[in-house]
Amino acid sequence: MRWKKIGCIFDPTQHRLPNGCTQFAQSPQALVFDDFVRVYFSCRSVDRTNGKYLSHVAFVDFAKDLRVILRVSERAAIEPGGLGCFDEHGIFPMNVVRYGDLVYGYTTGWSRRRSVSVETAIGLAISRDGGNTFQRVGTGPVLGSSLHEPFLVGDGFVATIDGTFHMWYIFGTRWQRFSADGAPERTYKIGHATSVNGINWVKEEARQIIADRLGSDESQALPTVVQVGDAYHMFFCYRRSDDFRKNPDRGYRVGHASSNDLVNWTRDDDALSLHGTPGAWDSDMQCYPHAFACDGEVYLLYNGNEFGRRGFGLARLER
């Protein structure tokens, strides 16, 4: 799969974002309209009570060529959850999918913990105004931890195929300390669930569907699936579970797998042919991919260095 890199198309530091956010445009997710493309992303503000980040969902509208910016949202598409809720401390990411006249937004809600840094779960919010604003279907998640997936369920990507909702998501396998004085780090893998209505989900409990490349301590994140020809192609990002934040050799890279039946996936990262550009915005890291089709073309949005601090870029699949 040969990709033509277009470059960084959105830098959050150059725009006025909701909720006082000035940095990060993480996990870009596209919603295609007749005459423009809307890209949702998560930006960050600082919680003044403790100095920690809070993630908020905003969006930017592009012309269909994905070069010209038409509008940046002035308000968050959805606010963080209430006191004690699974999404109290932010939403990152939010995947959007059309369902009739509605837009379903599958959110990953974050809540802070004491012994470890965070717990996550997947919620559902629905837009009835074309994706400008979203309202939760309830205060709890639609997919969360369970007997064999005990923590860190998130990064849901949803597609409707032959009348069935499919969700690819991540689930945590363990927390561990890699040094005596180090903070616990998480490891997670990609799983799959199905639904008849997009609300009630049945997991393939604890089945890791993408093989490891880096061993059992490989963390896999943010799956996205697109059909090209007769095959389905999944893009995701992967990294080491420790020393990944500032070490480029252990940070996120984009991986690839393909399937003909949505059940069995063959991993082939080398077929992706998408690499960082030395000295550029994605030189040290490529992460949080999102694949989508628009006007006969297949595109891949993704973040670069520092987990998307300076925005997201675009690549186009060459036939």
Image (cartoon, helix red, strand yellow):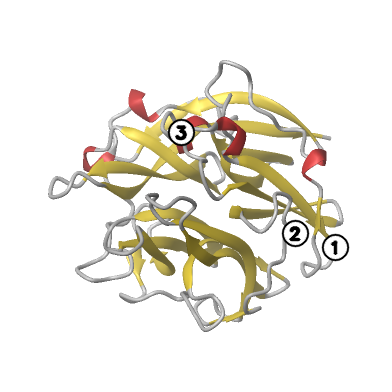
Nearer to us of marks 2 and 1 is: 2
Q: Residue at x 43, y 44 (%)?
A: 41
Position of residue 203 relative to residue 27, above or below, is below
- Which disc number belongs to residue 306? 3
Judging depth in this view, the residue of 203 and 211 nearest the camera is 211
Residue behind mark 1:
260
Q: Residue furthest front?
A: 180
Which residue occupies 50% across, 30% down? 305
Quadrant in which the N terminus appears: top right
Q: State the image coordinates of residue 143 (x, y, percent, origin top left).
A: 48, 75
Q: Which amino acid type is shown beneath numbered disc 3?
A: Glu
Cα distance between the residues tagged 3 and 1: 34 Å
Q: Amino acid at mark 2?
A: Ala
The disc at residue 211 is 2
Counting from the top left corner in percent of width and height, residue 229 is at 85, 51
* Amino acid type, residue under disc 1 in the picture: Asn
Horizontal arrangement in the rendering, residue 268 relative to residue 176 (left or right): right
Q: Crowdedness of circle 3 by 10 Å Cα count: few (<14), some, many (20+)? A: many
Left or right of 247 in this view: 234: right
